[in-house]
Image: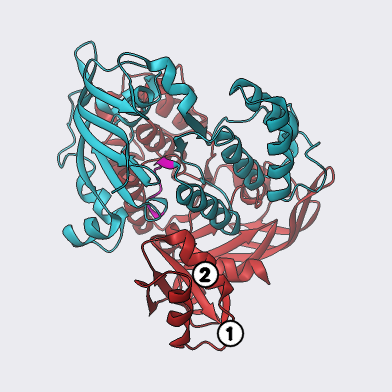
Amino acid sequence: MKDTVISVRNLVKKFGSFTANDNLSFEVSQGEIFGFLGANGAGKTTTIRILSGLSGPTSGEVIVAGIDASKEPEKIKNQIGYMCQKFSLYEDLTASENIMLYGGIYGLAKSRIRERTKELLKRLDFQDSGNRLISELPLGLKQKLAFSVAILHSPKIVFLDEPTGGVDPVTRRQFWEMIYETAAHGITVFVTTHYMDEAEYCDRISIMSEGRIVALDTPANLKEQYGAGSVEEVFVKIARPPNPPEGGLNPNHFIADVI
Amino acid sequence: MRKAIESSGICKKFGVTQALKDISFSVNESEIFGLIGPDGAGKTTLFRIIATLYLPDEGEMRVLGLDCRNEYKKLRSMIGYMPGRFSLYQDLSVEENLNFYATVFGTTVRENYDLISDIYSHIEPFRKRLAGKLSGGMKQKLALSCALIHKPELLILDEPTTGVDAVSRTEFWGMLKKLKQYNITILVSTPYMDEAMRCDRVALIQGGKILSTDEPQMIKNGFSRKLYSAKASEKYKLITALRQYPGTLSAYPFGDSVHITFVNDILDESVFEHLRKHGISNATITATEAGIEDRFLELMEK
């Protein structure tokens, strides 16, 4: 049995009278690739902020890498890595400078940073010893580098926010192989995405709707349970309430842009 | 039959970057034509040429029978263009934006309301809300309404579904299907291969070049090898072991499985023996149908 690295019990997060996370309970194991899905405004970002120590729960118990998120959120930050599609690397620094910067922030020793930089650049096939600016790199390479930087300090968990959106199919495959390799080395990979084919790559997925988790299982089991051919079909069936409100304002449909 | 778009030998350079190389294709009237390719493939550049916002360096582009170079003024009133970035006025309300676009094109919302009613009805309850305060899915519906309000003959949608959740995306494709009854030609781009199946015809684009143009089913059928799908509980181990098997031609992750082709196109029992040697005893390998993405990968490697 693998260790549990994320344990969430009855998590509630409220903003005023609006309940963004409504009594969530789930666990994620060491080395698992966990897909965290939901429609825009379902409450995913709120949960991730809590899991990464950026925001505290209103009530409930959240333990990440053995640390209680309500009591010591700052400590969580050393134990996790984070990468999102929009911003992860400094565009006006070179690849090596980015690695050095993040290595420094994570508190790695200088010798270790040098060693890791060399290793990484070789692995990602950088022809020019990493001296090009990030802004000059093709998207796919940028994404692979961003992922490598997010796990530079060997965190327990890495959070990925739509990691391969828009990337060409070859690079995307290489990216997922990096994810598999990372998971095989015991790092938990927590992925959020709107793209359901990406969800198919995960060991287990959860689907959130209106602040609650409405499904949680392996992609294969969910497809079987809902008689669907793909995770996308499952998602469309359950990710949104059957009757979207006509006329009345539903804050859920707007909250995505605010938080 | 008149073609909605006829492109031949289009080239476009920005500095040293060759954004488009010899692009030739045509789009039939009233079809949904998809341009499928990753970021940086040249989709937006091509769309801007079609929308008369860029001039090509070389080649001919005729849209709705008009020359993009010389007849752009006439053409502009006949096309509806929805750029990839939300480009409506964020500080105008939903209804103000729609009225503005109608007025610019010399029409009124009432005159063409039929055309947009299906789409606009979803956001009409929020018509007094500022456009900047809408959710992603609603912005997309408003942008589509604005692009349609002058009843264009050609609708150009640049990555309308990027960043939109799967439910809204399904709704969006449903709306496009319905627009076909008005004989509007729809040109739509997406980086997501699975959306190709929702188009009548598609062109696959990569690195500024069109790899293939056809009906999505025909593109799938173009896959030249026998494709197999392998599953095992430890995926990384499975990929690595399959690559070491001498009979493997290609092995790459695909959703919950690994897609493999074999040198002689036959699934030989010795592969299971090989996997067992590498500590994988629970693998299953079955024949599977190639998808658009498999074909795209195959074309990219050529």
* Rendered shade, chain B: red
Query: Which range of residues does the magenta coloring cover?
Result: A188-197
Secondary structure found at label 1: loop
As drawn, is A40 to the left or to the right of A74?
Answer: left
* Residue B138 vertical position relative to residue B65 in the rendered view, above or below: above
For the question of whether residue A133 can be seen, the reply is yes
Residue flagged by tag 1: what amino acid is it?
A: Val
Q: Earlier in the sequence, mark 1 or mark 2?
A: 2
Q: Which mark is residue B241?
A: 2
What is the x, y in percent for residue B139? Answer: 40, 32
Q: Determine which residue is flagged by label 1.
A: B263
- Which residue occupies 38% across, 23% down? A49
Do the numbered discs 1 and 2 sit on residues whose CB atoms are within 8 Å?
no
In the image, residue A190 lies in the stretch drawn in magenta: yes
- Left or right: residue B214 compared with residue A207: right
Q: What secondary structure is marked by label 2?
A: helix
Circle 1 crowding by C-alpha within 10 Å: few under 14, some 14–19, many from 20: some
In percent of the image, x 71 and y 26: which residue is there? A110
Instruction: Please state the chain letter of the residue tagged with numbered disc 1 in the rendered image.
Output: B
Question: Which shade is chain A?
Answer: cyan
Question: Which one is in front, B120 or B19?
Answer: B19
